[in-house]
Image (cartoon, rainbow, N blue to C red):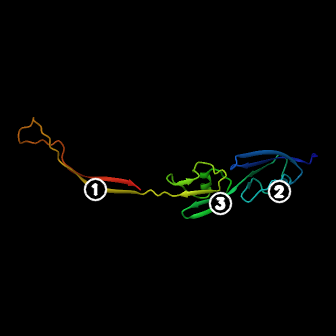
Amino acid sequence: VYDASSKEIVINEINEFQDVDVKTVVKTRQSNVENILVEYGLAVDEQDMINTPADSVISNGNEIVIHRGKEITIKTAGGEETNTTTESNVKDILNSAGYFVDEMDEVTPPINSNIGDKNVIEIVKIDVKEDVSEKKVEREIEYTYDPNLAEGTQKVLEEGMVYVESISCKK
């Protein structure tokens, strides 16, 4: 039985990895966030984020928002690193962990997907190097017969020349 001293608050539990966003309105006589969480059996782990400190005094109409997080291992050629995140999108996880990924790099799971129940992101850096070489090409003079010209005369249509051809190859 709750009376006038009870407070009505909202507990919003968000878990993007499992596509969960549940808001529950509860009545309590507890005075702070920690006691309310205990009363309703809600644990907040190290990887989770909560919008207000556990020792905060709670008032009628307040909302407690819990973002569930998890540890993600990011593997690269240089080794692996474990990060805690509440983000579910692979690109967002990598950005918040300080990783820059080029469009040519291979990322598993795919860069624009959600991590879901996976705990590992692998990055394979693809270095694209452009090899440019030049070579001289001589354009030879072409001769064609023209019956309209006097015998023994020549008319130059296009001079022969030497030019440089650039060849580009991506590796």
Q: Mark 2, residues whose alpha carbon is within 10 Å: few (<14), some, or many (≥20)?
A: some
Mark 3 residue type: Asn
Residue 55 rendering spot, x and y as whole percentages: 82, 58
Residue 11 horizontal side relative to residue 163, left or right? right
Q: Mark 1, residues whose alpha carbon is within 10 Å: few (<14), some, or many (≥20)?
A: few
Helix, strand or loop status at disc 2: helix
Label 3 and label 2: CA atoms lie apart by 25 Å
Residue linked to disc 1: 135
Residue linked to disc 3: 83
Q: Mark 3, residues whose alpha carbon is within 10 Å: few (<14), some, or many (≥20)?
A: some
Q: Quadrant of residue 145?
A: top left
Residue 94 rendering spot, x and y as whole percentages: 60, 55
Farthest residue toward the top?
148
Residue 64 rendering spot, x and y as whole percentages: 78, 50
Which dot, 3 or 2, sits closer to the camera? 3
Mark 1 residue type: Lys
Mark 2 residue type: Glu
Residue linked to disc 2: 34
